Image (cartoon, rainbow, N blue to C red):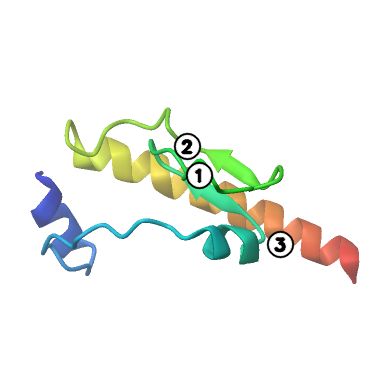
Amino acid sequence: MNIKSGLLADGLSGDPLKPKLVADKDIGDAARVITLGCELPKTAKPEGKITDWSNLPAVSIGYADARKAIVERVEKLLKELSDKQATLK
């Protein structure tokens, strides 16, 4: 399955979007920053809130494998955040 048909099957637009450079303010305001094979601007100060997911399978090589790996990471992240929230109550 190619990227466009995979995105469409998942209910997402298959149309390419123009990437937008993340702003320092976006990074500063975020509780956590997750990167997927990209570098943040040199001026960014993520201060320990960065998580790098660069070691995922490339979407361009295999949409299904990449999607599976991303879903697993997101589910793990959601569980971690949920568990953290539960301990704060």
Residue pointed to by mark 1: 73
As helix, strand or loop, the secondary structure at mark 1 comes to helix
| Mark 3 neighbour class, 10 Å CA radius: few under 14, some 14 to 19, many 20 or more | few
Kind of residue at badge 1: Arg
- Are discs 2 and 1 less than 8 Å apart at CB? yes
Mark 2 to mark 1 CA distance (whole Å): 8 Å
Kind of residue at badge 3: Ser
Mark 3 to mark 1 CA distance (whole Å): 14 Å
Residue at (17% x, 36% y) in the render: 60
Residue 58 tag number: none
Residue pointed to by mark 2: 53
Reply above or below: 71 against 38.
below
Kind of residue at badge 2: Trp
Mark nearer the viewer, 2 or 1:
2
Would residue 7 be found to the left or right of residue 82 on screen? left
Q: Position of residue 13 (x, y in %)?
A: 17, 68
Mark nearer the viewer, 3 or 2:
2
Instruction: Farthest residue to the front: give it.
Output: 43
Q: Position of residue 32 (x, y in %)?
A: 63, 55
As helix, strand or loop, the secondary structure at mark 2 comes to loop
Reply above or below: 57 against 26.
above
Residue at (39% x, 32% y) in the render: 56
Residue at (27% x, 33% y) in the render: 58
Residue 82 tag number: 3
Would residue 39 be found to the left or right of residue 83 on screen? left
Which image quadrant: the N terminus? top left
As helix, strand or loop, the secondary structure at mark 3 comes to helix
| First in sequence: mark 2 vs mark 1 | 2
- Are discs 3 and 2 less than 8 Å apart at CB? no
Residue at (39% x, 39% y) in the render: 38
Q: Position of residue 50 (x, y in %)?
A: 61, 44
Q: Nearer the viewer, residue 75 or 42?
A: 42
